[in-house]
Image: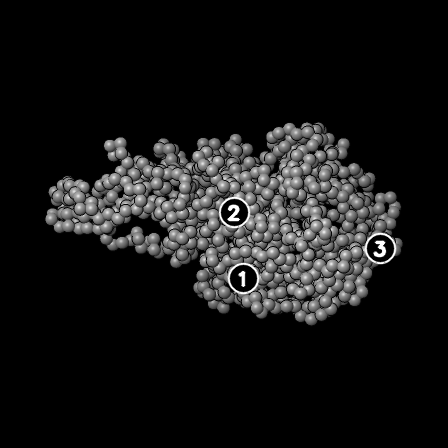
Amino acid sequence: MQRRDVLKGFTAAMGSALITQQGWARGLEQSAPPIAVPIRGYVRKNSKLMQPVRITLPSARAGAEVVVKIDGEEHDRRKLASADQAFEIFVEPVSKPQRTRVSLTIDGVEHAAEIERKPVRQMKVYVLPHSHHDLGYTDLQAAVEEKQINNIVQGIELARKTSEYPEGSRFVWNLEVLWGADLFMKRRSASDRTALIDAIKKGWIALNGSYANELTGLCRPEELVELFRFGTQLGKACGVPVRSAMMSDVPGFSWGTVTAMAQAGIRYFSAAPNYFDRIGTFMVEWQDKPFWWVSPSGKERILFWVPWTGYAMSHVMKLGDEWVDKYQDRMDEVGFPYDISCIRWSGHGDNAVPDPELSPWIKRWNETYEWPKFHISSTETAFSAFEKAYGDKLPEHRGDLTPYWEDGAASSALETAMSRNAAERITQAAALAAAFHPESYAPDKYNEAWRNVLLYSEHTWGAYCSVSDSENPFTLKQWAVKRAFAVDAAKDADTLLADALGSGSTTTSAAEVDVYNATSWSRSEVVLLTKEQSHAGDHVENAHGQAVPSQRLASGELALWVESIAPYTKRRFRLSSKKPARPAHAVSVRGDVLENEKLRVKLHPDTGDIVELMQHGDAANLVDTKNGAANQFLFMAGNDTERLGHSGKATITVEDPGPLVATVLIRTTAPSCNGLTRRVRLVAGMDFVALENTVDKQRAALNPNPGKGGQGGEFAQRGSKESIQFGFPMQVPDGKMTLDVPLAVMQPEVDQLSGSCKNWLPVGRWVDLSSQVRGVTWATLDAPLLEVGGITATMLGSQKNPAVWRKHIEATQTFYSWVMNNHWGTNYRAYQQGPVTFRYALRPHRGNSSSETERFATGLTQPLIAAPASGSASASEPMLHVSPQEVLVQSLKPSDDGKAWIVRLFCSSGEKQQATLTWADRAHAGKTWISNLSEETVQAVDASIPIYGWQLVTIRVERNV
């Protein structure tokens, strides 16, 4: 089953032009062709542009005389040399639509028709052939992989066959995304690989820089950068810089996509979403409206362009004169002001083969008609021609194009959390490898780990029948492959971390552990040792023999306090059976109140929800109890926001009483769950409260008639839909809401471009509510979706009407972590079951510091790491120190060639800074360069590196070894 079959009967919302596939087909299948049809093209006759009108005779005989009149005036008279029933006449062009009467007389019998002649656009239309890469959906992933590998072979062959065609009609095969090319280079023979590289150098095969059609809102910061890194590597191997990217099907992109593309040297972005379903107003706002999309820092921009019908034009239209007419109708309708345009041509269905009819058709058209011209090309060729002609006239827009389809990731919440956390651990592993065991850094292993993370965030989640026929082996097999990306990413991350820490090297004592800091700032916090790591006892001493606070927890873990561990260093601790040391200021639990020297947290005794969060010295309660309570469980059946389900009566017990760690356990019943377990934890000396919510989910009801109705049927669209969220109504007088997205910070509504999704928003690590006096930061480790201001994620099944989507987000301080749903009717999962844990933290603070917020949330997602002691016990100086504090190291790694350090700096404030890198002697740091994703030397810099607010800068520092 092909997706073009799925599209049948759906109305295509293309601005105000509405076309259905059946309606198009009816226009092509008339039993009797009209006697006169104007061709929407110009030909040159006697040095003059004329418009053809195709005359089709209802009957004819050789020798018959035919007289054609235009508006009563004789225009053409001829005797038929044969019984051919069609010929063309040529009329003067018109400057506006004009109704014209055409009559023809054959053997004294008159036939007449009225036609509409329209102006012909003297424009060049660039046509970008490609295949839409769905990794699954209509076929098993393994079969799709082979299809896309074979498509490269066929693309090369079509380019070879048409290489002598006139310019513009020679075939070019755009690699929409690059996972297929990656597999080609891994699986095919040496001669095939050489043939591909040669075709890329010739321009027969065009590279586009994205690895996959990604749900960018799900990406962790370094994951978003990695999305474009393979493209730079392949381009470098071929000697062809990659300056363009395509993404298809997905509507909307996180703002940091611009930043990541700029790091890869990408200037042009052809975005071609699904043109009708669950896309909100994205296509209404941006179809055929090219613009410069400006990065959060304001220092980079990319040319962003969405073509008519997204990537699906060849799915719903056929090459021919009528298509040329309809395309110009569209350009006229929207007032397209340019003489250059581009369209996608993705064959017939998803994962389609290259269309062999395209080049011959364009060759015939261009040889026949002078205007419009069609030109097969790469993305870069089309966009660079457009930029040359109009680049200085295009508008600039700065903001988030908040994406829509990320909501489906909450249909597999467990695996989504696994992939998110794996991405963070891979980043940590690379930094620790650089700091401690650079010889362990194996680029191929890291590339494979990132590939698994990227392919989990890729937009194809499962089969077309994943909801209507969820237990079909076809569905189950596709989900098994998709799930394996998350599982394998987690395994890869653990292996890379073990390698980076030198696991397997001689350990001095089973009673000793090392604690590592993989971030670029000094940290003081609690570290949890497993039972296995801490079997030697509960008493902990540092390398100087000084006791540090520790506590055995109810889980069997041992909590120990680590004070001021410097960036990229480790600390050694020895465990013994002596009595554990207490902190100077103990945390306490009294009834439903947890308190340390900084915070007071109060729970509702009946629900376990948080009703009070206060800083000592500030009487303000940061929880808005008029609108509920914080960490409140909410269940929505279908889209009924009026009858939300709540958790039941709470049983509250103290798990850990202090003095270092206080943990309260809250058990309740909950709708559609076997149970709900929440933990609220406060640590002595820490300025935040940690939350851990475990939902033991019951399976949603399955389709009682498996497969019946398909993805458009009633069950798939409305049956057994449900969602779970945790509410956080907060209050900070005069506070404004900002949230973290990968490589950017944005305010809902204020920083969202037109066409953005506002029913839900992807979130990276945190949401902050701040005034100049006080604020509160909410951090999320596992769940990537928010509803802002209310329960607004109510869009079930297919949603083709742009008008039903949320238009605005009003100022608010209430938000919901949307953790689970099965709202889609296809692709995503119909149900999930079993325990899934969602971790959060709430941190009250004074003032308003975005860099402080970024360090706090990143520290939670990249915690200090404990491992069996190995190597030297001495506390080494930091390998790298970066100042000022507003400049954070997003990633640190050895270069792939082993000759340098690669440092990615992120300015976590809105102001320009001068970054200084100070290296320890052991780093053997040499010359410093501005670099890129290819890790090349771009520009030499000195000790002070300018970096603008929210800018990402990649640095290469040579190793003098």
**Can you give x and y, in whole percent of width and height, for residue 642 in the image?**
57, 68
Q: Give the residue type at disc 3.
A: His
Q: Give the residue type at disc 2.
A: Asn
Q: Are marks 2 and 1 in contact (CB under 8 Å)?
A: no
Name which of mark 2 and mark 3 comes first in the sequence: 2
For the residue pair 707 and 25, the one nearer the viewer reads as: 25
* Residue displayed at 25% across by 34% down: 45
The N terminus lies in which quarter of the figure?
Answer: bottom left
Q: Which residue is mark 3?
A: 585
Relative vertical location of residue 246 with respect to residue 828 in this rendering, above or below: above
**Can you give x and y, in whole percent of width and height, for residue 595 in the image?**
79, 60
Q: Secondary structure at mark 1?
A: loop
Tag shown at residue 213: 2
* Residue displayed at 73% across by 60% down: 621
Tag shown at residue 794: 1
Most extreme residue toward the bottom is 649
Residues packed near mark 2 inside 10 Å, few (<14), some (14 to 19) or many (20 plus): many
